[in-house]
Amino acid sequence: MKISCSLYLSFAFLLVVLASPATALKIPAKDCKIKTVGGEQEGVWNLWSNGDVGDYFFFPKAGTYKVRVRARGTPVRKIWPLMALSKDGLALERIPVDSDSFREYEFSFDAEASVYRLTVSFLNDGVTDEEDRNLYLDWIEIRPSGKLAEPHITTGEEWERLNEEEESAALKKAEAGIEEFRKRDLLVRILDKAGKTLQGALVEAEQTNHDFLFGCNIFMFDRFPTVQENEAYKKLFRELFNYATLGFYWASYEPAKGQPKGLPPPLGLAGGVAWSFWVAPIGLPLRLRNQHRGCCRAHIPARRFGSNRLLAQPVRSP
């Protein structure tokens, strides 16, 4: 009889443990390892500029977790702080903190079984002579849902190690993909002028072009103080890249409605010497809203110019 009671109590205790909800992990904001800006004020952390507060977390199981933040804000011109949950430096869900009293705000986070750099981010700092937009953080809590295990705090070194492992795995997968999809065997016959096969010929192969666009902005075209620097810039750009991004901003092209000033450099050079070194310029699509002139849209379509060059021209559309 005593053994039966003991077994019954043990079984009941086990059921209670299994039915108990997972506990949450709560960290005071002032104690987080990641604090990119701000300072402690009356026991909470004041983000007085755009920045992050958070830590490195290990999630033992994949699933959806709730991230709760106790925060308050101060507005500027009736615009409150915008708070985001950021994963590994990327802002995910955004919530306005629209109260100067502390309240709890909740995010959802879908995690894999891995280590993450999770932070609460302040995105829209602002200040006037009378007002200062700040975000105040009291604590951050991560609560697992269902039967998920509670995450625990780890180190930045562990996060970096796992990132390096994932990057290495991705590069190996890319290399395997290149071997499988981007390469093939090729039989080359070297002939003399008479059409006969040459034996033991020394052959050198050089790739002169490819279909992958590789480049960056060309904002410094002819903007260095000396001719030597400008020529060096063009030479290096030509040797390394095969396309350029052109910065086009409507305000500099048409400062007053109906009075365009002409194309800003380097767009103004697009039809001339700028593209004599064979790059494909890509224009930036624009969608602008001007509070004084209403809404306008602009785009820069590309048309053929020469053999394999493109010339970008701005076009105003209603």
Image (cartoon, rainbow, N blue to C red):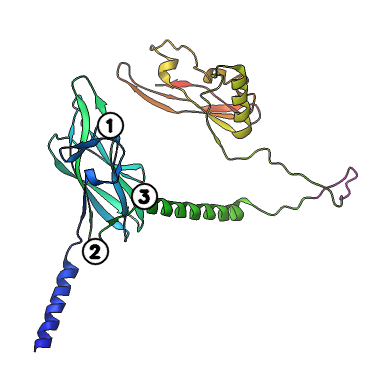
Amino acid type at circle 1 is Ser
Residue 248 lies in magenta, yes or no? no
Indicate the quadrant where residue 297 lies.
Answer: top left
Q: Magenta span: helix, strand or loop, mainly?
A: loop
Q: Residue 305 in the image: x percent, y percent? A: 61, 26
Disc 2 secondary structure class:
loop
**Camera-side residue of 161 and 266:** 161
Amino acid type at circle 2 is Lys
Q: Which residue is mark 3?
A: 156
Quadrant showing the N terminus: bottom left
Report the residue at 23% width, 58% height from top.
145
Q: Which residue is mark 1?
A: 49
Disc 1 secondary structure class:
loop
Indicate the quadrant where residue 96 lies.
Answer: top left
* Mark drawn on residue 148: none
Report the residue at 12% width, 83% height from top.
6
Disc 2 + disc 1, Cβ < 8 Å: no
* Mark drawn on residue 147: 2
Amino acid type at circle 3 is Gly
Report the residue at 17% width, 69% height from top.
17
CA neighbours of label 1 inside 10 A, class few (<14), some (14 to 19), many (20+): some
Query: What separation in Å lies between label 2 and label 1 (alpha carbons)?
Result: 38 Å
CA neighbours of label 2 inside 10 A, class few (<14), some (14 to 19), many (20+): few
Q: Which residues lie in the magenta part?
A: 189-198
Report the residue at 77% width, 50% height from top.
188
Disc 3 or 1, which lies upstream in sequence?
1
Q: Give the vertical position of 112 relative to 118 (above or below).
A: below
Disc 3 secondary structure class:
helix
Disc 2 or 1, which lies upstream in sequence?
1
Q: Residue 128 in the image: x percent, y percent? A: 23, 21
Residue 192 lies in magenta, yes or no? yes
